[in-house]
Amino acid sequence: MAVLFAGLRYEDVVRKYAQTVANVCVMRLKNQADAEDCFQDTFVKLLTKTPSFKDEEHLKHWLIRAAIHSCYDFIKKNRRTISLDTVPDEPSYRSDDAYDISWALMKVKPDYREILYLHYCERYQVKEIAEILGRNTNTVKVMLKRGREMLKSVYGGEAE
């Protein structure tokens, strides 16, 4: 009998949430190869720890948190930094989505990048982001405001 996670088989969980987990890892590490390692680690943790979930939203929150923790562990283990100079000033691709801000997020500090990514790309509200990241709601609000100001400067606009 297959193990179910919030009513989904493991393969279905990977298929449904692979892009979200991959994006979280890339946003945090800014390196595709390292992000792939953390991506795999996240899904291995799911399979080996077999946590129980109330619903699919709880499962998604757990995966995002596990991916972030995997990235933190990777950074601690490797103790290397990636220069912002390696990120191009302009996107090297054209996205069909005119609102794709992933290239701009790479220019923002990692803690702000996570909050901005969860808010704009995953469409989470402040309270949900606070729960996922284990932070105070007011802290997330302030970081979201500061992160928006950072994004404005990346896009060449003036911060308020």
Image (cartoon, grey):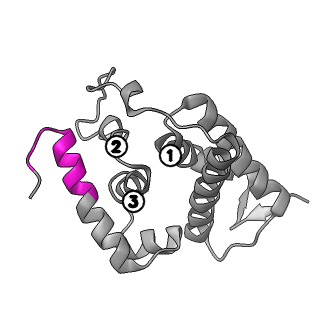
Q: Position of residue 57 (x, y in %)?
A: 55, 68
Depth check: give the residue in front, 64 or 76: 76
Q: Position of residue 64 (x, y in %)?
A: 57, 58
Would residue 45 be seen by someone viewing this image from the given angle? yes
Q: Position of residue 50 (x, y in %)?
A: 81, 64
Judged from this view, the residue extending furthest toward the right is 1
Say above or below: 10 vs 125. above
SS at circle 1: helix
Q: Is residue 149 magenta?
A: yes
Query: Residue 28's mark?
Result: 1
Q: Residue at x 39, y 59 (%)?
A: 115
SS at circle 3: helix
Query: Residue 115's mark?
Result: 3
Q: Is residue 42 left or right of residue 131?
A: right
Query: Residue 105's mark?
Result: 2
Residue 54 quadrant: bottom right
Q: Residues under labels 3 and 1: Cα distance?
A: 11 Å
Q: Is residue 25 left or right of residue 89?
A: right
Instruction: Say whether marks 2 and 1 touch (CB < 8 Å).
Output: no
Which quarter shows the N terminus? bottom right
Q: Residue at x 68, y 68 (%)?
A: 6
Q: Residue at x 23, y 36 (%)?
A: 98
Q: Residues within 10 Å of mark 2 (few under 14, many from 20)?
A: many
Which quarter shows the C terminus? bottom left
| Magenta stretch bounds | 147-158
Number of callouts:
3
